[in-house]
Image (cartoon, rainbow, N blue to C red):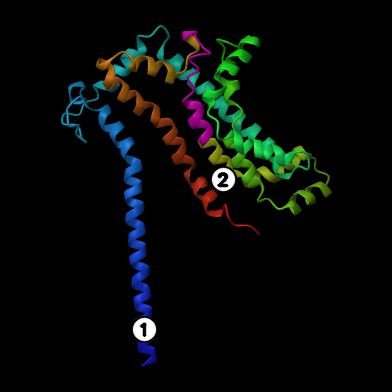
Amino acid sequence: MTDTKKLKASERQAGRHIGGTVVIFLFLLVLGLFMALPIYLACVMSVKPVHELFIFPPKLYAIDPTLDNFRDMFTTLSEMWVPFSRYVCNSVLVTVSVTVAQCVLASMAAFVLAKGKAPGRGLLNKLIVVSLLYQSSVIYIMQYIVMAKLHMIDTYWALILPSVASPMCLFLMRQSMLNIPDAMIEAAKVDGAGMFTICWQVVMPNQRPALMTVIIFAFQAAWNIQGGTLVYNEALKTLPTVVQQAAAAGLARAGVAMASAVFMLVPPVVIFMIAQKQVIETMAHSGIKD
């Protein structure tokens, strides 16, 4: 009799567990669909003819799908004063430079703040957290004044240097490096390693998941750099700036604007798909300590 009661209790518990799993699955499914909806709408709008873009009520599918919007986009961008390939090269140069610089500087600064013993380290960490609250638009005027004093207006430096320092990347790297045992640092010091060697040969090999996460954030932000107030030379403009100029020509370019949005979305998505395994590993082990 006792075994029967235990069996029934176990079945009820298993039923509640399955029911809870189903509820969580449905909730995550709805949340995932809600987050994927903007991407889906952008892709659908990019293959709609111009006359379908203004149908009311709007439809969630294309009645007569076409690739004319993408053809018009490349045609429009090719007719600019500078070849389309130059805009692409500018974006690639700026994006790669900013991403590499952010990863290097954020890693070194995070190592000092996480494992260094410098006075005022706690105050600096608090300032970094506070700086996360500010948008880059707050310092636009100051950036322009500094760039003008340094004679960097209308140069690549005007696009790269303001984006090199990233509080978010620094914060993520610092939080990850806090999980490194101090015993590992002390053992490296006993072996005669300096701080620079410890940072790049001891700590950084264990920070690959966090570094891949930083690369995703840095690449996404750098790929969307426009610099319209700092760069006026057409030969130095990046692809987002030119795409925005082409899409701002009026309602006739609405399809071009949708195609441009999808085109600009592809590189960040590709980078995320490549690095998502490392990001998932970071989330899974972020709360585990020895």
| Label whose residue precedes the other's in the sequence (2 or 1) | 1
Residue to which mark 2 is pinned: 209
Q: Nearer the viewer, mark 2 or mark 1?
A: 1
User: Which amino acid type is shown beneath numbered disc 1?
Assistant: Leu
Query: Looking at the rendering, which quadrant does residue 208 occupy?
Result: top right
Name the residue nearer the viewer: 46 or 191. Answer: 46
At x 46%, y 25%, the residue is 224
Question: Is residue 77 left or right of 215 when viewed as pictured?
Answer: left
User: Which amino acid type is shown beneath numbered disc 2?
Assistant: Pro
At x 27%, y 22%, the residue is 255
Where residue 115 appears, x then y in whole percent?
73, 44
Q: Residues within 10 Å of mark 2 (few under 14, many from 20)?
A: many
Question: Is residue 51 left or right of 82 when viewed as pictured?
Answer: left
**Residue furthest toward the bottom?**
1
| 23 inside magenta stretch | no
Vertical relation: 158 (above or below) 268: above
| 220 inside magenta stretch | yes
Q: Residues within 10 Å of mark 1 (few under 14, many from 20)?
A: few
- The span from disc 2 to disc 1 (Cα, nearest Å) is 44 Å
The dot on residue 276 is none
Where residue 105 appears, x then y in whole percent?
65, 32
Question: Is residue 227 left or right of 176 when viewed as pictured?
Answer: left
Q: Quadrant of the N terminus?
A: bottom left
The dot on residue 7 is 1
Name the residue nearer the viewer: 235 or 124. Answer: 124
Q: Which residues are magenta?
A: 217-234
Name the residue nearer the viewer: 130 or 168. Answer: 130
At x 35%, y 26%, the residue is 261
Question: Is residue 148 left or right of 29 when viewed as pictured?
Answer: right
Q: Are marks 2 and 1 in contact (CB under 8 Å)?
A: no
Q: What element does badge 1 sit on?
A: helix
